[in-house]
Amino acid sequence: MKEPTGGQLELLTRAQLDRIHGATVQVLEKLGIKVWGKSAFRLFKEAGAETDQKSMMVRISEKLLKETVRKAPSEFLLHGRDPKYKLLMGQKKVHFSIAGQPVFVHDLDGKIRRAVVRDAEEIAKIGDSCESIHHISVGTVPSDVPDDMHGFHVLLANWKNSRKTADGFNYGARMAEETIEMASLLRGGEEELSKIPTLLGFVNPVSPMQLSKELIEGALVYAKYKQPVLYAPEALAGGTAPVTLAGLLVQQNAEVLTGIMTSQLANPGTPVLYGTVSAAMDMRTGVAALGGPEVGLLNVASAQLARFYNLPCRGTGGNTDSKTVDAQAGIETAQSVLMASMAGMNLVYDAAGSLDGSLVLSKEKIVIDDELCRMVTRTLEGVTVDDETLAVDEILKVGPAATFLGRAFTSKHFRSEHFIPDLMERRSREAWEKDGRKDISARAREKTRRILKEYVPEPMEKDILSDP
């Protein structure tokens, strides 16, 4: 499995990062943040923050901020259902995830419908088969199970159909505790689970400047067992955050850091991810422009801020506002995935399958986006310059008016040097027309059907998975 390294792209200078940090401190000291969960509120109070019980506001000094955030690890390993499958979150390693929590599915027959548990199973299976999809998210919100049970059904669907890493589910303390119980069975006990991070929790702070009760309560449960949690606001510039991107970054930074502090106050050393889902608000429609170029800019800046605090990071790439698999979807997906990857985001969430701002998941687009992620992986590998690859001897041997095709040197290096597509069309027009004039969506649908029919995921151990 390739874990490419990003971080080639940076937009902010050290002086600009210092200014964003300074502005963040002003916001947290003068305004503070509203912490709705009583247990989390109590942790801040006991740590010495200035608190107001009536308003649930917490004001945080720079000293307390630095002391607490410093306790978070700079990297950690996230393990799959198979504990041998692990992703390094840190060191600018880049990993790609399927789109998270879409309500609808764009099926292979082109219809948009409400998702069901069967879709979660198929999405996990497709993701498991894809080389560059590293993480299986909560791929759907199934409509055929109760609302308070869908997280458990999706987690089980992911484990049954993929050995890769997967999201947990921490909406409220009860759900968090029950997914901990599931993962403890998988790992052979709570103590083993604490040693092998397996469930990736998530908290989306409520912009502006609030930590919601349910998600924070669930995050505290995950902290108890050292399960990682990502903190990622979906702040909208001009809506729930200042219209300027710098102002949004200040607010987002305050929201993320106080979330990370919650995990560290609960259990120092709990792994966390500094995250973002932020975007601009489209001033014509009032909706989130998740496919806009601002998303890429915010990903790069957020990755730099994460490294400023010595934290691993999670970004958002792959979201598109397009309603179907078309040129718009390709443009927006490619731009955001490439920028997030070059920024060195450790987990590029929503990288595969997103339509309509991730309200819809497209199975064929997972396969297309896997090819895109392979292209991005090759881009991140860059150009190797050494005595072998400079090929001076090869150039001298071949000389002018000859060809390098068929040479042993070419045979040795072309697979590692060149991207070899599966879906992208590179044949002659005549060959393409003879094969039915299929566009990339048609080819992706054919491949997806083959996966669903023929691919067999590595099964779960029989002593863990009981018959339904």
Image (spheres, rainbow, N blue to C red):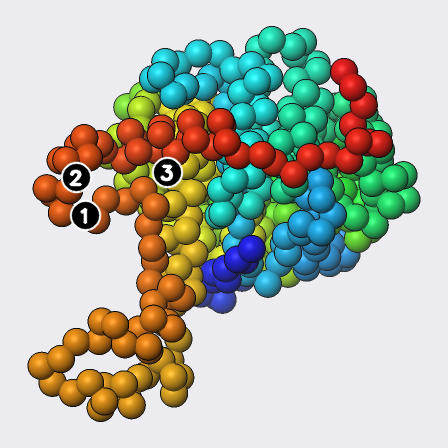
Q: Are marks 2 and 1 in contact (CB under 8 Å)?
A: yes
SS state under label 1: loop
Q: Which residue is mark 1?
A: 427
Q: 44 or 460: which is nearer to us?
A: 460
Tell me which amino acid carries mark 2: Trp
Name which residue type carries label 1: Arg
Q: Which residue is mark 2?
A: 432
Q: Nearer the viewer, residue 174 or 209?
A: 174
Above or below, comparing residue 429 to residue 269 in the picture: above
Q: The N terminus appears in which quarter of the rendering? A: bottom right
Q: Residue at x 45, y 19 (%)?
A: 105
Nearer-the-camera pick, 200 or 456: 456
Q: How far apart are the two marked residues, 1 and 3, measured between alpha carbons?
A: 18 Å
Residue 452 drawn at (x, y percent): 49, 28
Q: Can residue 238 be seen in this snapshot?
A: no
The residue drawn where x is 34% and y is 17% is: 110
The circle drawn on residue 220 is none
